[in-house]
Amino acid sequence: MFSFFRSSPEKKVRKRYLAKLEEAMQAQRNGKIREYSFLTAEAEALREELEALNGAPLR
């Protein structure tokens, strides 16, 4: 009945994905390339999870 109060799992994962990409960008700007690569790998895992939820690849 009140499903509009709940956020979808897709929105939660997308928000985490975008935050992880932002964090990776900041690490790269600060010269922390190793940290950047780890964060990018985590973001890619979130992207794959997001694609699995959507059923279609992201652009």
Image (tube, helix red, strand yellow):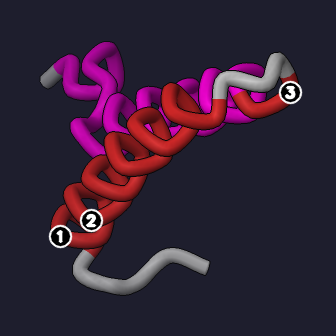
Percent of width and height locating residue 34: 51, 33
In percent of the image, x 37 and y 50: which residue is there?
41
Residue 11 colored magenta? yes
Disc 1: CA contacts within 10 A as few (<14), some (14-19) or many (>=20): few
The label nearer to you, 1 versus 3, is 3
- Residue in the foreground of this view, choosing between 27 and 33: 33
- Residue in the foreground of this view, choosing between 26 and 14: 26
| Gap between marks 2 and 3 measured at Cα | 25 Å
Q: What residue is pinned by disc 3?
A: 29
- Residue in the foreground of this view, choosing between 28 and 4: 28
Disc 2: CA contacts within 10 A as few (<14), some (14-19) or many (>=20): some
The label nearer to you, 2 versus 1, is 2
Q: Quadrant of residue 13?
A: top left
Q: Quadrant of residue 1?
A: top left
Disc 2 residue type (three-letter)? Glu
**Mark earlier in primary sequence (2, 3):** 3
Magenta highlight range: 2-27
Q: What residue is pinned by disc 2?
A: 48
Percent of width and height locating residue 35: 51, 26
Q: What residue is pinned by disc 1?
A: 52
| Gap between marks 2 and 1 measured at Cα | 6 Å
The secondary structure making up most of the magenta span is helix
- Residue in the foreground of this view, choosing between 59 and 27: 27
Residue 3 colored magenta? yes
User: What SS does tag 1 mark?
Assistant: helix
Image vertical order of residue 36 relative to residue 51, above or below: above
Percent of width and height locating residue 54: 29, 70
Percent of width and height locating residue 30: 82, 17
In percent of the image, x 63 and y 35: which residue is there?
33
For the residues labelled 1 and 3, say whether their Cβ atoms are less than 8 Å apart. Answer: no
